[in-house]
Amino acid sequence: MSEVQQMTPYQLLGGDAVLRQLVDRFYDIMASDPRAAGIHAMHAPDTALIREKFFDFLSGWLGGPQRFIEKYGHPRLRGRHMPFAIGESERDQWLMCMFQAMNDTPMDAALREHLEEAFYKTADFMRNQ
């Protein structure tokens, strides 16, 4: 009897190369779109480290290599974001950047719909205001 292996969102996205494109596009939009000024201001001017951490996190979150956990331990997302005031506006700015980055990254429509829902739930969970 053969087992059917289901592909993870990480694999469906296209692995590291496409994930890197998504992460870089996300931060590029955050830095350049005035509608994201509020969340952009929460980040250091040099985003190299946070881009790498976000890439590592998303890799595992999407079912790929658990790079973030291997380097930093459990993500503890809410705890790591507590120093920042995150309300509906900040959530919506983050989602705007991510959804635009997803628009600019080739992916299957069903995967996009799945990720939009998952990103919304996660971003909404980060609210602390």
Image (tube, rainbow, N blue to C red):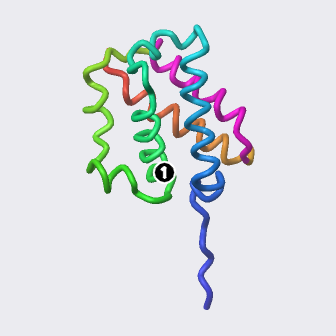
- Which residue is at a point 45% across and 28% down the rendered structure image? 47
- Please tell me whether residue 48 is drawn above or below residue 96 in the rendered image: below
- In this image, 76 relative to 94: left or right? left
- Which residue is at a point 60% across and 15% down the rendered structure image? 32
Q: What x and y, as percent, mark residue 119? A: 52, 35
| Magenta region | 89-107
Category of crowding for the residue at label 1, using alpha-carbon neighbours closer than 10 angstroms: few (below 14), some (14–19), many (at least 20): many
Q: What x and y, as percent, mark residue 40? A: 47, 16
Residue that extends furthest to the bottom in the rendered view of this protein = 1
Q: Amino acid at mark 1?
A: Ser
- Please tell me whether residue 38 is drawn above or below residue 77 in the rendered image: above
- Which residue is at a point 72% across and 33% down the rendered structure image? 104
- Please tell me whether residue 57 is drawn above or below residue 47 in the rendered image: below
**The N terminus, quarter of image:** bottom right
Picture quadrant where residue 54 is located: top left
Magenta run includes residue 110: no
For the image, the number of numbered tags is 1
| Nearer-the-camera pick, 17 or 83 | 17
Numbered disc 1: secondary structure: helix
Question: Which residue position holds label 1?
Answer: 59
Picture quadrant where residue 125 is located: top left
Magenta run includes residue 105: yes
Q: What x and y, as percent, mark residue 4? A: 62, 76
